[in-house]
Image (cartoon, rainbow, N blue to C red):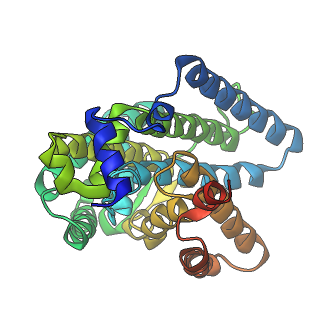
Amino acid sequence: MSAAGERGVEAAVGLGAPRAAPKLLAPSPHHALFWLGAVLLGAALVVGLRLIGNEYGYFAGYFILQYIVLSSAWNILGGYAGYVNFGAAGFMAAGAYTAIALRKAFGLDLLPGIVAAGFVTGLLGLGTGYLTLRLRGVFFSIATLCLAVVLQTLIVNWDYVGGSRGAYIVRPREVPPFVSYGEYMFVVMLMLAILAVGISRTVELSRLGRGLQAIRDNERAAEAVGVPTLRLKLIATTLCGVLMGVAGAPLPYYSGYLNPEAAFSLAYAVNAIAMPLIGGAGSWLGPVIGAVLLGGLQQAATVTISSALNLWIVGWMLVIFVALFPRGIIGWFRRRA
């Protein structure tokens, strides 16, 4: 077993904790400062975009924030535990169609739809984890990809939510006290992004995070010394499912129309993996950096050239970073330090 694996296992069970282990537990004042800083930064973004007065700024901001939530969710299972999940599009679509079904059944608006989507996709993540987490490596990844295919088949044949025709949601022109509907949606996704990054950071700095890192380093060794690997992985899949579901719930409200092809877009699955890898998987800040960098480049390409280049950009960025910076931007800075 590698030295890194031994340190991860020891930290997870509290045996012979290495010197660096105390840094994994952030003192509460620092944690409070993180939340305060995140809220202040979010408020500054809202004020700045309102002063600019360009509606496209809200669209681009929503796009990037959506991927911050999605990539932070993927990082909990793929970055900390090392289980690569190809089913991000499936969980996002499940959240989106939960919100649609709730609106059609009870007439409830976006915020209850987000709560319901998180509950449904959390249960979906828990069930998926229970059935698939005994698989390892590429077999687990294939299982999550199959889940997305199964969910898409169900949605295409479910007429209540529009089936293959898609579903429409009539958007209000304005939502007081916001200056526009675009600003309202931006603020909702901003709050979800702050929540997702905060949860990811809390996981990383907790005993749960150390246990997941031990699983990533050497799962058999972690099991041998008493780490409850299956329980920790189930918690991770549930959190991952919840966050991916809430990332998808606002999608039909923002676009006004959603069909299975758009909901299960390959771009969600690819970006959910590429952004944490480029920013630095296994760190709460890595997915944020990757989403801002890659999402910003995709939006710039959409405005100046064509949206068809989005996945082309992702592919080249991923190849470059895997070849030159295999641990991402965060890993490169840590090595330089």
Q: Residue, x 57% and y 53% (percent of image)?
A: 286
Would residue 301 be found to the left or right of residue 48 on screen? left
Would residue 230 be found to the left or right of residue 56 on screen? left
For residue 74, above or below residue 32: below
For residue 21, above or below residue 7: above
Q: Quadrant of residue 273?
A: bottom left
* Residue 335 spot, x, y in % from top left: 61, 59
Q: Nearer the viewer, residue 113 or 332?
A: 332
* Residue projecting furthest to the right: 51
Q: Residue, x 33% and y 63% (percent of image)?
A: 84
For residue 101, above or below residue 146: above
Q: Nearer the viewer, residue 262 or 229?
A: 229
* Residue 311 spot, x, y in % from top left: 56, 77
Residue 275 appears in view: yes
Q: Residue, x 21% and y 63% (percent of image)?
A: 154
* Residue 60 spot, x, y in % from top left: 69, 56
Would residue 336 be found to the left or right of residue 264 on screen? right
Q: Residue, x 35% and y 40% (percent of image)?
A: 210
Residue 118 appears in view: no
Give the mark count. 0
* Residue 244 spot, x, y in % from top left: 40, 49
- Placement of the N terminus among the 4 image quadrants: bottom left
